[in-house]
Structures are given as structure tokens and as C-alpha cells.
Amino acid sequence: MTSIGTIVVPLDGSQLAETALPYAAALARATGAGIVLLRVIEEMRPYYDERRREVVWIDPMNPRQELLSPELLGAAVQRLAGLGLQAQTIVRLGDPRKEILAEAEQHADPVIVLASHGRGGLGRVLLGSVATRVLQLSTCPVLVVRARETDEQPAHVDFARIAVPLDGSREAEQALPIARDLARATGATLHLVRVAETFRHELPDDPGSILRTPSYEAILERFDQLEAEAREYLEATASQLREQGFRVTVEVRSGDPWDELLDYTRTSQPDLMVMTTHGRGGVARWFFGSVADRLLTHAHVPLLMIRVQAPGRQ
């Protein structure tokens, strides 16, 4: 049993936005969760509902309708059907930033799956106001994938390698439960990553005898200590996971956390990275700081963002 009950996929009619569909399908296959395809319109108008075979108005009196319109979500439904999956189709009237969150709240244990680009109501998904607002305010996990043109989109997605960046805090560790659930459901290997903020790259490669002062040696000793502590922490966490039957690897990196995590996504290319939106040290300020900006705008791996729960609410 996983912690995902419903997968909400907002679409805007663009092929770029449909990049989210293979990832939603992969989550659904792994977890058994239902898929809800969501289209938010900002002006009231009628649509023909294929299921009821009648015209349905989306207006302030009926701002949320379950309907299947070829004009809105028909292509996405067919695409999922080709993957052997069915989906509920919902059309809502209003501000996309509010309606996406409102729809997610209608379902048990939801996850929102967004492509990083689109147009119209869901346009500017990652760098614009819609996704920014969704990611800021969503209390449920949000999976962000990099949008691609149709001919570049994967036909099939597997989560065989799941990366979990950690910083030693309980807040960052809140990413582990859903990562464990997905790994158990898919048979994936968990890859734990921690960045020790040692900044060795800022030291000269060969400082010479003049710079090898007691203070310089103390800095090196402190760097060694930080890296050893990071590895000890990851190994202890990995040991607990291995006892539960998971395959786990660990990797300690040294330097600037944002640069190192971004480089990790490029070199290791995990199928999914699961992380919390808060932490401390290297992973702190993730969502509203430069780590999130870099990972969400430059990383080409799917990012599953988990909102940190306050003490007593986990």
C-alpha cells in the first residue's frame, strides 16, 4: 500500500503539457492510484460531453463538471487508454492557480503531476505564476517534469533509480516515506545523496609551505570531519533501509549544495528525485531559494517535491 491515492494531472491543451502523462501513468501502474485529468478554463462556455451525449455548460452555477470533451481532454484520455489506463476527466472554471489546488483537495492522498511548460491557463507552468503558486501552497506532493515536444516524450517511464537528497535534518527525511513506498512498489534502488559544504574547490591545489599554516591545516581537518559525518549519517540511514529489504546506495559530495545536486542529476541521471521543500544546511531554502531555482529550471530529471509537515502533523 502506497501513500498515493489519486494522481491529478492539470493539462492546458498543449502537447508540451502532456509530457506529464507518461509519468502519471508510471505512478498509477506502480501504486494503483486513480488518475484525474484536469482542465481549467477561465471563461464560461458550453462543451459537448461524449459520455452523456449532451451539451454541458461550465459556468458559475456549475463550475466543476465531470465530462469528456474531445476539445479538452479527449486526446489525453486516448493516450492513457493506449497505456491500458483509464482516467476521470474534470473541467473547472476559474483561476488555474486556485482550481488545481481545489481539485487536489477533493481526493484522498493526492499527488499533482505538472509539466514544466505549457500555454494558456497552465502556461508558464514552472517559471510562471501558476506552478509557482501551486508549489508554494500545495499541501500534497507535486511531481514536476521537464516538458518536451511530442516526438521527444518517452512512451514509457520506469522509476528504477530513485534519488533522495538528505541534509541530516528530520525535515529532509520526510521525503523518505514516499520514496520507500515507490521503491517497494517498483523494485527501484534508492540512492541517498548528501552534500558536505566543505568547498575544497576554493582552496589551492598546491598551497605550498607558506600557506600550510596551522589554521589551513585546521580547515582541512574540519572538512574531513564534515565529510566523514555526512557519510556516517548516510550509511546509518542506508543500513536501516537495507534491513527493510531495499537496495540502497550512498553518495557524499563536497562543495556548494546547489551546484553539486544539479551536477548529480546530470551525471547520475536518476529516474526520479524525491525531496522536501525545507531542510537545513545544504538542502535548506530549497523551494524558495536558489536550490529550487536551479533544480527546477535546469535539472532534466523529474522532481517530486514534498511539503514538510509541522511537528505533530506527520
Image (cartoon, rainbow, N blue to C red):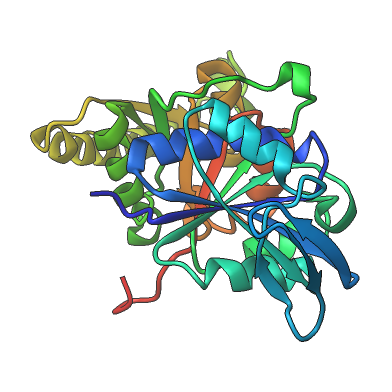
- What is the tally of numbered marks visible in this picture? 0
In this rendering, the answer to whether 168 lies above or below 270 is below
Looking at the image, which is closer to me, 37 or 47? Answer: 47
Spot the residue most to the front.
53
Answer left or right for 124 relative to 195: right
Looking at the image, which is closer to me, 141 or 225? Answer: 141
Spot the residue most to the bottom.
61
Determine if residue 180 is in view.
yes
- Figure quadrant of the C terminus: bottom left
Answer left or right for 33 relative to 35: left
Q: Position of residue 63 (x, y in %)?
A: 73, 77
Q: Position of residue 111 (x, y in %)?
A: 49, 55
Q: Residue at x 75, y 41 (%)?
A: 17
Answer left or right for 199 relative to 15: left
Q: Residue at x 61, y 21 (%)?
A: 266
Looking at the image, which is closer to me, 229 or 42? Answer: 42
Q: Position of residue 56 (x, y in %)?
A: 77, 68
Q: Where on the picture, by quarter, is residue 194?
A: top left
Q: Residue at x 88, y 73 (%)?
A: 44
Q: Residue at x 26, y 41 (%)?
A: 233
In this rendering, the answer to whether 310 lies above or below 14 is below
Looking at the image, which is closer to me, 74 or 149? Answer: 74
Q: Where on the picture, by quarter, is residue 89?
A: bottom right
In this rendering, the answer to whether 95 lies above or below 80 is below
Determine if residue 164 is in view.
no
Q: Position of residue 243 (x, y in %)?
A: 8, 35
Spot the residue most to the left.
243
